[in-house]
Amino acid sequence: MGSKAKRQRAKTRKWKARAKALEAGRNTAAPTPAGSAASGSKAATVSPLAPAGGFPQLPAIDGLRLSACAAGVRYQGRPDVMLAELAPGTVLAGSFTRSQTRAAPVLDCQAKLVPAGSLDADSGAAILVNSGNANAFTGARGAASVQAICAAVAARLGLPESRVFTASTGVIGEPLPHERVIEVIDTLAESAAPDTLAQAALAIMTTDTFPKGAGAEIEIGGETVHIAGIAKGSGMIAPDMATMLVFIFTDAALPRPLLQAMVSRQTDRSFNAITVDSDTSTSDTLLVAATGRSKAPPIDDPASPETAAFEAALGRVMMDLAHQVVRDGEGATKFVEITVTGAASDLDAKRCALAIANSPLVKTAIAGEDPNWGRIVMAVGKSGALADRDKLAIRLGTIPVATEGLVHPDYREEDGAAYMRQQELDIGVDLGLGQGRATVWTCDLTHQYIAINADYRS
């Protein structure tokens, strides 16, 4: 064994130990990605909104093996490539950014997930992810990098290239040094093991301050079905997805069209209902893989209670991961739920909620713990949603702030200021026009957001 391979294996053992510590809840801190904004003289600190207890204990998924190692794509001394090997019979569904400048890996995944792409399901599948370089805005060279990586993974694992999916996250506009990724494929394949989601979650981070994971278990036909997922995301987060990578695995058996329908619905309710900074990424990728290895009966009737139960569990995992992305928003100190009711339509309600959530003035007021509800009025007015000033009502938590276009007679500024000092906030707006309703989640906008993004490439 060469010295380089020995060093890679030593690093892998180190990060497996870190991953085990995370799973045990002993350490919520994430390593600082070298080359990120958080890696300068001021070390990154874990978001104050991070879930208590560290990385969760996730259920093992039969038919899934994972590995991660350091390839030096951009970062040094930390894992930056993850491989997921999926058993024969696995079906995949996905959701992706609708950016008009989508990255090469996104375009490749979308092409492979058309219905015809499920014909090779008997051969198994693989997902390879790198952090540090988005392989976006890299032209034909970017597509060639994707093809080279897929070919190398396919050859090593004995898969058709149509069953190899890739994702990349990091700096835009720099060619991906894919040869560094290809060099570690043997190491990844040899070290792949079940129940290693924490290690994989570490490898896909960029400016994240903690690895993100969520899981669920449900009983179907007297047998247990498991769901487990990981995500990365911290900045460049807005609906139509965001700068997120999300990978969810289940041992349930279900047909691809049904799985895709569930994923599309639940994406709109979760990842398409969060925003950190209103910027939509070139690289958003959500893949859900079902290995079919559970002993539970297949989920194949769209109208059955079992199908509804599985989709509800999948939705809970997706919502948990989406909320963790907001909780790790770059520089965030407040987690904010915004609910708009009484709109002319659900679409109008969501349009209004997002206008509030994306307003720099609203977000900086939240950061400063200032109950400046006039900024909420402003955001409603600019949203494009149908609104009537004299029917508008606003609340902060349970505190009525405004009603019928005027400040509520019982509202006291000191009550609003006290509420804004809380770490988790609930803002409600009722437009008084109809039955439309929507909820979105966001965070505040602080000086740290500027510091992180001003120095992102240094």
Image (spheres, rainbow, N blue to C red):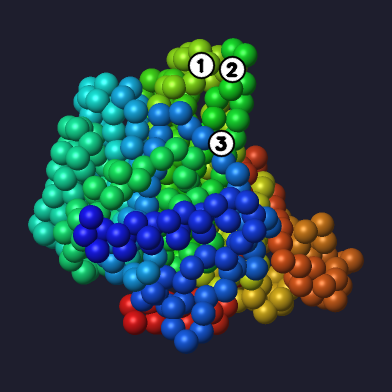
Give the residue pinned by disc 1.
Answer: 295
For the residues labelled 1 and 3, the Cα–Cα distance comes to 15 Å
Residue at horizontal 45 percent and vertical 68 percent from the top? 207
Q: Residues within 10 Å of mark 2 (few under 14, many from 20)?
A: few
- The three-letter amino acid code for the residue at tag 3 is Pro
Q: Quadrant of the N terminus?
A: bottom left
Q: Are marks 1 and 2 in contact (CB under 8 Å)?
A: yes
Give the structural element (helix, strand or loop) at label 2: strand
The mark that comes first in sequence, 1 or 2, is: 2
Q: How far across and how far down the image is residue 95, in percent? A: 37, 42
- Choose between 78 and 210: the one closer to the eye: 78
**Residue 379: quadrant of the picture:** bottom right
Quadrant hosting residue 72: bottom left
Q: Which residue is mark 3?
A: 59
On screen, residue 256 versus residue 220, left or right, reads left
Q: Which residue is mark 2?
A: 223
Q: Secondary structure at mark 3?
A: loop
Q: Amino acid at mark 1?
A: Lys
In the displayed structure image, the side of residue 248 where residue 421 appears, left or right: right
